[in-house]
Image (cartoon, rainbow, N blue to C red):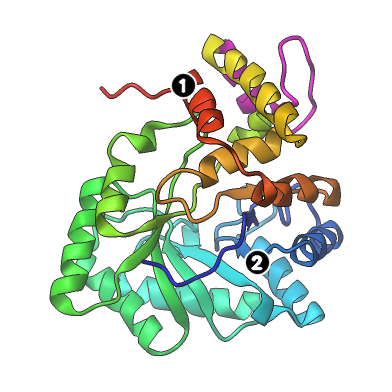
Amino acid sequence: MTSLDFGPVMLGGNVFGWTADREEGFRVLDAFVDGGGRSIDTADVYVAWIPGNSGGESETIIGEWLASRKRRDDVVIATKVGSLASRKGLSAANIEAAAEDSLRRLQTDRIDLYFAHRDDEETPQEEALAAFDRLVQAGKVREIGASNFAADRLRSAAAIAASEGLTPFTVAQDEWSLVERAAEIDLVPTLDELGIAEVPYSSLASGFLTGKYRPGATNDSVRAGKAGAYLENPRNVDLLAALDDVAADHGTSVTAVALAWLAAQRTVAAPIASARTVDQVADLLAAGRVRLTPQDVEQLSAATEPVSG
């Protein structure tokens, strides 16, 4: 099990260098940490999808903020390896080179949580885990995590780590939200069995679970297409009504309630959510102050209960 304290929510770094430039990114990071936030999630591939970028832009902004504000000891920093085109996969050489790249961009001497961004079935798990373990033994990484891994691959990685005396995965990162619940069928029971904590990404479903996407409403966000598509499912429209009811009962926002629902799930250490403006930070942090009742959790869960295949 992880020893890291993620606080009420992890701040997603995928907006830095994309929808939040360096200046706005600094303001968001200031507001998040000043408001009690304690963890930041990024990746070497953030934000390589923007024309003219090559990856590492998010890490660079975070690193410049850490150096400028002298806040390194105040936050848990998570980053990832495996998805950047120039640092693809989980070979030992790639993991070790990518870690050095990330350390340099983040302007730090250690990565608190280093994720395999996605599985690499072409590289033996023994090789990848040994490379991660060397980084831990060298003090460059504190804990390691697995993002987007299938349940059986998590089990095999745990067995290898145990038999070889290697650092095990202590944290997983996967898509999970009130409208994306496939993880609950096989993955979550496996995490529970292995003692691996989950920090879900897309916890607000591209903004849909902020409540700003409603039937008949228009929105000019870069994620409006994906978020708006959730309205095509009547269950998700019903969910919005349930979120409104619970938020009103607690005197808080739909955003905070959606994140609090995730935080109430077994295995979840903290949900990951992004903020591209300072105004959005308060709702993220408010999730840590919401105490949903069992009835609240059940009401929200029932609206989009997953069906196993």
**Residue type (three-letter) at the residue carrying disc 1:** Ala
* 259 vs 23: above or below: above
Q: Secondary structure at mark 2?
A: loop
Task: Identify the image quadrant of the C terminus.
Answer: top left
Seen at 59% across and 34% down, the residue is 205
Would residue 223 be visible to someone looking at this image? no
Q: Quadrant of residue 231?
A: top right
Q: Which residue is mark 2?
A: 38
Q: Depth-wise, is mark 1 or mark 2 nearer the camera? A: 1
Q: Which residues are magenta?
A: 211-232
Image check: 138 left or right of 73?
left
Q: Residue 99 location in percent, x, y?
A: 48, 76
Within-10-Å neighbours for mark 1: few <14, some 14–19, many 20+: few
**Numbered tag placed on residue 302 in the rendering:** 1
* 248 vs 218: above or below: below
Task: Identify the image quadrant of the N terminus.
Answer: bottom left
Would residue 53 be visible to someone looking at this image? yes
Q: Residue furthest left?
A: 163
**Numbered tag placed on residue 104 in the rendering:** none
Q: Is residue 212 magenta?
A: yes
Q: Secondary structure at mark 1?
A: helix
Image check: 201 left or right of 26?
left
